[in-house]
Amino acid sequence: MDDKLEFAQRLHDAMQRAGYKPRPAVLEREFNTRYWGESVTVQAVRRWLRGEAIPSQDKLQTLAEWLKVEPQILRFGEGIAKSVKQYRERWDEKLTHQERETVDAFLQLPAPQRKVVREVILTFAKVYKDDGGTPSS
């Protein structure tokens, strides 16, 4: 399934969970009462509901606030939120205090120095990976 169709399904589901019928006229009316920018047309929201288009970020934010759903979940689905959460948990669990200090110091370096440090780390990682975890002499 493509991104637009998946978004349309999430929009349908969110509207229904919020107590609205997923119809273009309903979406257009409810959206335009909440959006501060230029009003959208029934044709535009019909394209969202049919999976022919995805709204811009500002419109997506308005939809998410109205429908009481996280904007990234509305746009990308639950999978991305779970993936990000798992990555953050893995990051938090694996790093020691000293490693966090090192990362903080790295982030404070000017961009050219960060690039050098990154290259050194990636080179070490490649050497250890290629040799099965033991450095070559």
Image (cartoon, rainbow, N blue to C red):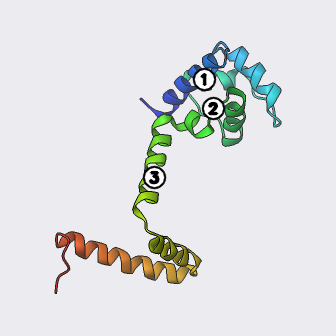
For image coordinates 67% across by 14% down, the residue present is 19
Tell me the crowding category of disc 3: few under 14, some 14 to 19, or many 20 or more residues within 10 angstroms, Cα based: few
C-beta proximity under 8 Å, tags 2 and 1 = yes
Q: Is residue 106 left or right of residue 41?
A: left
Q: Work out which quarter of the rendered image holds the N terminus and state it.
A: top left
Q: Work out which quarter of the rendered image holds the C terminus and state it.
A: bottom left
Residue type of the residue flagged with mark 3: Glu
Tell me the crowding category of disc 1: few under 14, some 14 to 19, or many 20 or more residues within 10 angstroms, Cα based: many
For image coordinates 44% across by 82% down, the residue present is 116
Tell me the crowding category of disc 2: few under 14, some 14 to 19, or many 20 or more residues within 10 angstroms, Cα based: some
* Residue 42 screen position, x and y as percent: 72, 20
Q: Nearer the viewer, mark 2 or mark 3?
A: 3
Residue type of the residue flagged with mark 2: Val
Is residue 31 positioned above or below 73 on the image?
A: above
Q: CA distance from mark 2 to mark 3?
A: 22 Å
User: Residue farthest to the bottom?
Assistant: 137
Q: CA distance from mark 2 to mark 1?
A: 7 Å
For image coordinates 60% across by 23% down, the residue present is 14
Q: Earlier in the sequence, mark 2 or mark 3?
A: 2
Q: CA distance from mark 1 to mark 3?
A: 27 Å
* Residue 67 screen position, x and y as percent: 68, 26
Q: Secondary structure at mark 3?
A: helix
Q: Secondary structure at mark 1?
A: helix
C-beta proximity under 8 Å, tags 2 and 3 = no
Is residue 44 positioned above or below 36 on the image?
A: above
**Residue at which label 2 appears:** 69
Q: Which mark is residue 89?
A: 3
**Residue at which label 1 appears:** 14
Residue type of the residue flagged with mark 1: Ala
